[in-house]
Amino acid sequence: MSRPDVISEAERVLDAAPGYVWDGERLPVPVEDIADSVFGLLVRDVKDMATAPGAPALQEGQALSGLLLPGRGEIWVNADEARQWPPRRRFTIGHELGHWVMHRAPGQQSLFCRRTSVDESAPQPHADRDIEEEASAFAAELLMPRMLFVREHARLSGDVGALCAAFDSSRAAMDRRIATVFTDVG
């Protein structure tokens, strides 16, 4: 999927949010409420992600950040990561919502994301890179909508800490968003 297509998908989701969920202006974007109200997805913070149906075996030091269970209509978020890094939880929900919107297939039972899949700065294995990069780009567009981002960037004089606070974003996600908005041509 091209970057403009990913942007369009995120904009479509934001446009579908009822006004009582999000008015198109209020920050931060209520990603969990959008997942629930627009798509009927339950977001669960789960202590042991390995209990998910079909969970892959993980190597030493690997962890699941989030997963999508399409058949159950659930997004699972790693409870330990969510507690330590609330902005990461928001990004993980947006990332999994991106998989729901762009990548789920009929009959698919699960889609798992390792920690590196939702870490904007981590390299991805080539086979997973495209859908994982798309899901992360979707999350950034959803959580930091382009027009609001440009407006807030100007209002806050580019202060990264203030932008992170306004969008309830991690520094890594904000740095990447600044780069994509102000250096991408499409």
Image (spheres, rainbow, N blue to C red):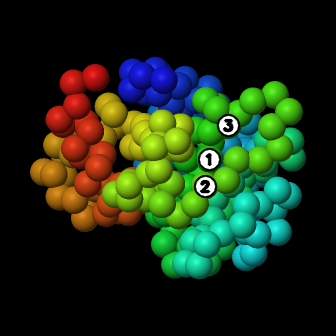
- Lateral position of residue 47 relative to residue 184, left or right: right
The tag earlier along the polypeptide, 3 or 2, is 3
Label 3: which secondary element: helix
For the residue labelled by badge 1, is the local secondary structure a helix, a strand or a loop?
Answer: helix
Report how far apart the C-alphas of labels 3 and 2 lie in the structure. Answer: 13 Å
Residue underneath mark 2: 113
Q: Is residue 106 visible?
A: yes
Query: Toward which corner of the image does residue 171 lie, by quadrant?
Result: bottom left
Type of amino acid under label 2: Cys
Residue 34 x/y as whole percent: 64, 41
Q: What percent of the width, then of the height, locates residue 55? A: 77, 60
How far apart are the alpha carbons under marks 1 and 3? 6 Å
Labels 2 & 1 near each other (Cβ < 8 A): yes
Residue type at mark 3: give it: Trp
Estimate how packed mark 1 is, as few (under 14), some (14 to 19) or many (20 or more) residues with alpha carbons within 10 Å: many
Query: Disc 2 or 1, which lies upstream in sequence?
Result: 1
Kindly identify which residue carries mark 3: 100
Nearer the viewer's eye, disc 3 or disc 2? 2
Q: Secondary structure at mark 2?
A: strand
Q: Is residue 150 left or right of residue 42?
A: left
Does the residue at mark 1 contact the one at mark 3 (Cβ under 8 Å)?
yes
Q: Which residue is mark 1?
A: 96
* Residue 11 spot, x, y in % from top left: 48, 26
Please report the residue visible at 83 percent of the width from the left and 44 percent of the height from the top: 109
The residue positioned 52% from the left and 42% from the top of the image is 127
Residue 142: mark = none
Q: Nearer the viewer, mark 2 or mark 1?
A: 2
